[in-house]
Image (cartoon, rainbow, N blue to C red):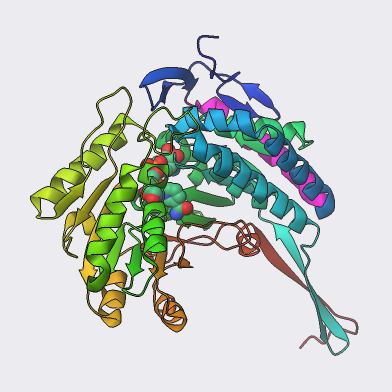
Amino acid sequence: MPYPTQPTASHFINGAYVEDTAGVEIPVIYPATGAQIAVVHEATPAIIEHAITSAKAAQKAWAAISGTERGRILRRAADMIRERNYDLSVLETYDTGKPMSETLYVDATSGADALEYFGGLAGSLTGEHIQLGEDWVYTRREALGLCVGIGAWNYPTQIACWKGAPALACGNAMIFKPSETTPLCALKVAEILHEAGLPAGLYNVIQGTGAVGAPLVTDPRVDKVSLTGSVPTGRKVYAAAAEGIKHVTMELGGKSPLIIFDDANLEDAVGGAILANFYSSGQVCSNGTRVFVQKGIKDAFLKRLQDRLNEAKIGNPMDEATNFGPMVSERQLSIVQSYIVRGEAEGARLVCGGKRIERDGYFLEPTVFADVTDDMTIAREEIFGPVMAVLDFDTEEEAITRANETEFGLSAGVFTSDLTRGHRVIAQMEAGSCFINSYNDAPVEAPFGGSKNSGVGRENSKAAIEHYSQMKSVYVRMGAVDAPF
Ligand SMILES: NC(=O)C1=CN([C@@H]2O[C@H](COP(=O)(O)OP(=O)(O)OC[C@H]3O[C@@H](n4cnc5c(N)ncnc54)[C@H](O)[C@@H]3O)[C@@H](O)[C@H]2O)C=CC1
């Protein structure tokens, strides 16, 4: 084995690791050093075909067993993930560069939560009975068939589970294509699911870029596509899926507002803004990167924010004391750097950070801009890095209007000690996943997803069941059929 993190093979299909070295090589880079730690091969047409035929062959029998039996396997997989959390967290850190202080508590554990939650729900998926005089209708909640999951690179284990768990609970088969930037973790999820008793063919992982994602989306044997990715990719995938009238879930990007009122608890508001901008080095879709701060608290907010950012422990992600790691790739680093240059050029005031850190890997300082105005590029476009834009405001009405002036609608947050204002403001936010006096919590029990250009459908919670199953209604006549002729 050339690298300790090298997977057994590139793909996991029909219950086993599979290789086809004819596929283009995809190097896997550890973002904290820039070193190559593995190589996988992009799926060839033969690999794609193998995954689709295996999944199709396995799905009907899976849908035919009871939900309780399906759920038992998912819950067993959840337990195994928790038992192996340390090793899975190390792999997630290698894949993404995120510090162990995050991956140990958030990634595999959140995946396990999804498997446990949907495993628990699987036995309670039912239809209903509708009496119509003597006749009656009953409904059956049925699987969609073959679901394709396409992942982003920021939460590879979590995304693999958030899509796989509800799909499998509802009786579907899944083909999951991880991001080409982080191909390692989903293979482990597949391995564990099958070790837990999942029949072969029901959860397959194949590697590749959009060149592999695209034919999966258009294949007529695929019934549903769930994408986590950027808005431009979402637009393409949604359109391609529409051609085949397929079901979709789109979890896309954001530029979410976080509104901090004068009466907010300063320490909590600063903590919320840190969670909303610097967790995972800012590579979180729901981040509140437009921080609207009411003028009365602005100076105190910026001062306390700087003090706390000085305490960030930046460095080796494998050291559990580290709490701020590198960007996922050189490419992402340079995208974020170009936004910082734009921010300065357009007149925003750089409060702190802004520079690449002099060491191996793709480290960038936590960066804060103040005096940002609504028209600046850094206030309009998703940066997907550790760059906070602080905007001033005077009144509640103004903050609400400006917060909603965006094509995105993933998340929104408000910090205030006025209870009624908190609810009043959040009710007017055009966003799917919102927070009051908190930010970025994502428990499996709560629906997660965006409005406007940030997406369609919801992941997690009972809402996800609607997106991985369909209703059949059956009319039952008890008497004679009365036909006109
Ligand atoms: N709303 C949400 O739940 C989340 C959204 N994101 C968003 O993801 C983005 C960052 O992730 P990236 O991996 O850079 O996104 P991306 O949009 O570049 O890629 C996402 C995935 O789509 C695949 N893909 C690309 N073109 C395709 C095509 N034509 N057909 C099928 N698949 C295709 C890629 O290979 C990758 O697996 C950000 O915009 C972020 O906001 C990230 C995490 C969560």
List the single residue furthest toward the top. 1
Q: Residue at x 34, y 64 (%)?
A: 257
**Residue 469 picture location, percent across and down:** 67, 59
Q: Is residue 346 above or below residue 78?
A: below
Q: Is residue 297 above or below residue 103?
A: below
Residue 148 location, quadrant: top right
Q: Ligand 1: which quarter? A: top left
Left or right of 417: which side holds 10?
right
Query: Is residue 219 at least partly visible in the picture?
Result: no
Identify the magenta region. 42-64
**Residue 39 picture location, percent across and down:** 47, 19
Left or right of 20: which side holds 414?
left
Instruction: For the C terminus, give its image quadrant.
Output: bottom right
**Residue 322 colored magenta?**
no
**Residue 384 picture location, percent across and down:** 33, 47
Q: Residue at x 79, y 74 (%)?
A: 128
Q: Is residue 393 above or below residue 370?
A: below
Left or right of 452: which side holds 419?
right
- Most prominent secondary structure in the magenta stretch? helix
Residue 179 location, quadrant: top left
Instruction: For the N terminus, give its image quadrant.
Output: top right
**Residue 43 colored magenta?**
yes
Q: How many marks?
A: 0
Query: Is residue 328 at least partly visible in the picture?
Result: yes
Residue 59 location, quadrant: top right
State the residue in front, 52 or 424.
424
